Image (cartoon, coloured by chain):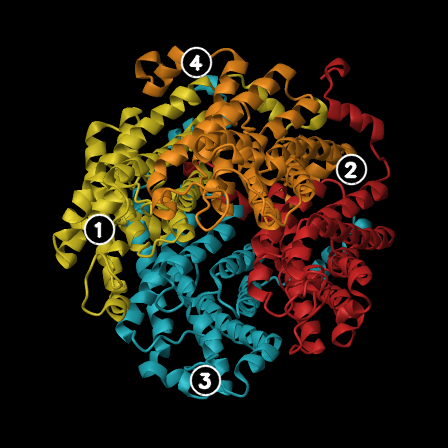
Chain colours: A cyan, B red, C orange, D yellow
Amino acid sequence: MTGANILPEERLRRRIHIHDPTMRNALSELFGTALLVLNTWIQINLGWGLAIAFCVYSCSKTSGGHFNPAVSLAMLTLGKLSTKDCAIYCVVQTVGAFIGAMGSFGIYYDQLVNFAGNDRTIEGPHATAGSFCSFPAPHLSNLTCFFDQIAGTGLLVFFVCVVIDKRNGIPNAAHPLLFGLVVMMIGTCMGMNLGYPINPARDLGPRIFTLFIYGSEVFTYHNCYFWIPIFAPVVGAVLAAWTYHLFIGAHIPDDNKVHILDDPKVPLNKI
Amino acid sequence: MTGANILPEERLRRRIHIHDPTMRNALSELFGTALLVLNTWIQINLGWGLAIAFCVYSCSKTSGGHFNPAVSLAMLTLGKLSTKDCAIYCVVQTVGAFIGAMGSFGIYYDQLVNFAGNDRTIEGPHATAGSFCSFPAPHLSNLTCFFDQIAGTGLLVFFVCVVIDKRNGIPNAAHPLLFGLVVMMIGTCMGMNLGYPINPARDLGPRIFTLFIYGSEVFTYHNCYFWIPIFAPVVGAVLAAWTYHLFIGAHIPDDNKVHILDDPKVPLNKI
Amino acid sequence: MTGANILPEERLRRRIHIHDPTMRNALSELFGTALLVLNTWIQINLGWGLAIAFCVYSCSKTSGGHFNPAVSLAMLTLGKLSTKDCAIYCVVQTVGAFIGAMGSFGIYYDQLVNFAGNDRTIEGPHATAGSFCSFPAPHLSNLTCFFDQIAGTGLLVFFVCVVIDKRNGIPNAAHPLLFGLVVMMIGTCMGMNLGYPINPARDLGPRIFTLFIYGSEVFTYHNCYFWIPIFAPVVGAVLAAWTYHLFIGAHIPDDNKVHILDDPKVPLNKI
Amino acid sequence: MTGANILPEERLRRRIHIHDPTMRNALSELFGTALLVLNTWIQINLGWGLAIAFCVYSCSKTSGGHFNPAVSLAMLTLGKLSTKDCAIYCVVQTVGAFIGAMGSFGIYYDQLVNFAGNDRTIEGPHATAGSFCSFPAPHLSNLTCFFDQIAGTGLLVFFVCVVIDKRNGIPNAAHPLLFGLVVMMIGTCMGMNLGYPINPARDLGPRIFTLFIYGSEVFTYHNCYFWIPIFAPVVGAVLAAWTYHLFIGAHIPDDNKVHILDDPKVPLNKI
C-alpha cells in the first residue's frame, strides 16, 4: 500500500493518532460509556446486551471497553490495569454516562412530555426518573438491594474473567459478543429486583444528570439508596474475579495434549 | 475439477458472469434491497435484523451489501466507493425497495383487505400505510424526527465502521451477522420514536409505491415529513463514520505483539 | 489410539458402520426429520429455528440434513444430488415427519385432552389439528397460499444457496446455525399467512397422521388446500436456487487477492 | 514471561493449583451447578440457556461442565467418565444445586414475601414452590411426566453427543454456546408439560431445600412425583446417547477429502 493510494481514514489516523495509551484509552472509555447510555434509554434485555457487545467491539483494541468502574477495579486487583489508569477510567466512565443520559433526554424529550406532561417524578403513574437510573420499589429493603447488586455484578465479572482467561481458549473476536450475552443473561435471570444497574458509572452519571431535572430526591430517595449501586458492584466485582481464579481458573490443567486431540482440524486418521 | 464433471451452477456462471464490477454490484444492490423489503412487510426487530444479515451475506462478495444510500454515501467519504458507483447504488437501492414493497403488497393483499376492507389510510384504526414506510405519530415534532434519524443511522454506521475496520480483527464471515445484530439493537433500543427507517431507500422506495395506493398524502403528511428519512440518515451516517475514526479508529495501536499474546492457538508454555 | 484403549462408541461404529452412502444418508434424513417434527409440536419461531439448526448439525456429515423434499429437489437441479437419492430422501423425509407427529401426539396427549376434551376439530375454539400441519384461515384464498408458499420456501432455499456457496466463505461449522436463523427469520417476517410450512414432508407426513384422528377433512378442508404446501414449496425452491446463481452467485469475482487483504490473520504492516 | 512480571492470578494459581483431576473437576461441578441454580430462580428460556452456556464455559477446561447427573451417567456409558468420577459428580451436582437454591432464596426473599406473604404453598394463587423445582399440573399423569422427562433429557443428550462428536467438526470454543442453545430450544419446544427440569440434580437439590420451607409435601405431591425427574432423565440420557451413535454417529464416513474440498481457506482456483 503506497502513500499515493492511501484511504482517507488512514490519512486522518496518521495526523491525529494519540500515542499516549492512557489518553487514548480514556477517550475510548468516555466515548464508549456515553454511547452505551445514549443507546439504552429504554432498558430492554436484548437491546442492552447487544449495545454492550457493540460498544465493547468499538473499544476492544484501545481501552478494552470496560465502561464500568466495578470491572476496572476488578482488573486493577488482577494486575491488568494500573492504579492511575483505573482512576482515570472511573472518572471518564461516569462523565460518559452523564453525557449519554443528556443525549437520550434530548432525543426522547417529546416522548417524555407526551407521557408525563410537566410531571417529573420518581414514583407514581407519571414516573419517568427510572429511565435514567435505578430506583428500588418501596417493598425492597436496602440490604436486599446491596446483595442483589453484589450478586448481579459478581455474575458479570465472574463470566468476564471466564471469557478473557486465555486458558479457556475462546477466540478474541467472540469476547465482546459473549460479554453482551452475559449481560442479557443477568438481565433475564436476575433483573427482577432492581433492573440490574450493576455498574456504578451507568447509575451515578445519569443520576447526577437527573439532579437538574428531578431535584435532590434522586439522591435521598429510599434512605439514600444511591450509594448502593456505587459500592455494592465494586464489592461484587472484586469478590467474583478472585472467586473464579480461586475455584476454577487456578485449577485448569496445563496439558496441551487435550487441545491437539480435540482440534477439529487434525485429520481423524492421525489420532 | 475437470470440465466434464462440472456442476450446473458452474456452467451457468461461465456463461453469464458479468465482468464489469459496477454492473454486477448494482445488480446485487437492486436484488438485495428488493429482497430485504419484500422480507419485512412486518417490521419485527428479530426478523428484520436477521433479514439484514442474510441479505448482506448474499451480496457480501459482490457489492458488499449496503442496501442503504446513507451507508453508501458514508463509504464514499471514506474513499471506499467511487462517486459513480455511489450514485448508481443509491438509485438501484431505491428501485429495489420499490419492487420489494410491490411484492409484499401482493403476498399480503388478502390480509390487508381482511384487516382494513377498502380503507387505505395513514391514520386511524384501519391505518395500513405504516407497513410500507414511516409515518411519525402526531405528537412528534419534525425536529425530533430529524435528530432521531441522525442518531439511529449514526449508530448503524458507527458500528458498521467498527466491524469492517480490519484493526478490530473481526472475521469477515461474521460481518453480515453482526450488521444484523446492530440493526436489531437499534430497533430494540431506539425504535420508540419512528420505528427506525434509518435508510433513505427503504423509506422512499416504498413511499413512492404507496403514492399509487394512498394518494399524495404520503408525501404531504406531517408537514412534508417524507424528506427527513431521506436527508437525516445521510447526515447521521457521514458524521458517525468520521466520529468513529476520529475518536477511536485512528488511535488503535499498531503493535501486533498483543495479537500474538492473545492468540489462543499459541501453546501456553510458549508465552 | 490403540485398539486396546478404544471408546465404546468407536467399537459400535466398527461393528455397524453402513458403507452404502445412500443407505446411511436415508437413515439420517428419516431420523432427522422425525426428530425435527417431534421437536416442534408447538411452532414457536425461536425454538423451531434452533430445532432446524441442531437437527442439521446431527446429520451434517452424513446426508447433509435436508429434511425437506423442496430442498432436496432444488439440490437435484443443482447437480448436488442424484435422482435416485432425491427420490429416497423425499420418501423417508415424509415417513420421518409422520413418525415425529406420532411421537408428539403421544407426549402431549394429556395436554390435548385437557384443552379439547373429546373434540378433534380443525376449526373452532377447540381446534387442535393446526398443531400437526397447516390449515389456512378462511379469509385466505388458495392462490394467496400458493404464492405465500413459493415466497417462503423460495427465501429459505435462496439463503441456503448463499450459505453453502463456497465463494461466500462461510465456515462449514456455522452452516447449520445459519440455516436455523434463516428459518427463524422467515417465521418472524413471513409467518403471518400460514405459519410457514415451507416443507412438503413436514406438512404431508403429519397430515397423513391426522387422517386417523380428524378424518378425511384434513385433506378436503379449504378446497383441498393440502396439495399447496406440497407443490408450491418445490416450485419456490427450484426458482430460488437458480435465482441466486443467476443474479448473484454467478457474478462473484474470482480474485483471491481480496481474501488475503481482508484476512485478519495477516499482520497489518504486511499490507 | 519472567517470574518478576507475573500476574496476581498466576501467583495464586501456582500456590493453590489442585493436581488431582477428580478433586478439581468435582470442585468445578459443585461450583458450576450452584452458580447455575442461583442464576435461574426465574426459569426464562433465553436466560436459562445463556446461563447454561456461560456456566459450561467456566468449567469447560476442568470438569467439562456437566452439571447434570443424567449427562454424567450417559458419559459413563460412553466410556468418557470413570465410575468413581461419575458418582462424585452426581453427589456434588446435587449439593451444588442445593446451595444455589439457598442463594436464590436469600436474594429474592423480599420479593417472595411481597408476593406470597407468609404463605408457602405448592398450589394455589400464592404458590411459590414451583420456582425451586418442578411440580406437575394436576391434569398431567405421572406416566406422561415420565415420558416427557425421557424425551426432554433425551433431546438434550442427543444434541450434546452431536456437538462433542469430533467427526462433526464443530470448534470447541462454540460447544458451550451450542449447549445453551440446545437447552433454549428444548425449553421453547418442549417446556409445555413440566417446565423441563431434565436434570436430576437441578430438581432434587432445590427440592431438598424446599423440604425445610414447604414441608414434606414437596416429596409426596402428585403421587410422589419427585422420583420421576430423578430417574426418567437418566433413562432418556443413556438411550439418546446410544441412539445418536447407533443411527447417525457410527455412519459418518471417514473421508477427509470432503473436508478439504469444503474448507473455505483453500484458494478456489486450487479445487
Asked whether the beta carbons under mark 4 and mark 2 sit within 8 Å of each other, the answer is: no
* Whether marks 4 and 1 lie on the same chain: no
Identify the chain of the residue marked 4, using the numbered disc in the image.
Answer: C
Residue type, label 1: Pro
Asked whether the beta carbons under mark 1 and mark 2 sit within 8 Å of each other, the answer is: no
Residue type, label 2: Phe
Q: Locate residue D145: give its quadrant.
A: top left
* Whether marks 4 and 2 lie on the same chain: yes
Q: For the N terminus of chain C, which image quadrant?
A: top left
Q: Which mark is residue C247?
A: 2
Label 4 belongs to which residue?
C17
Quick check: can you spot residue D23?
no
Label 3 belongs to which residue?
A121
* Whether marks 1 and 3 lie on the same chain: no
Label 1 belongs to which residue?
D206
Q: Earlier in the sequence, mark 4 or mark 2?
A: 4
| C-alpha distance separating marks 4 and 2 | 42 Å
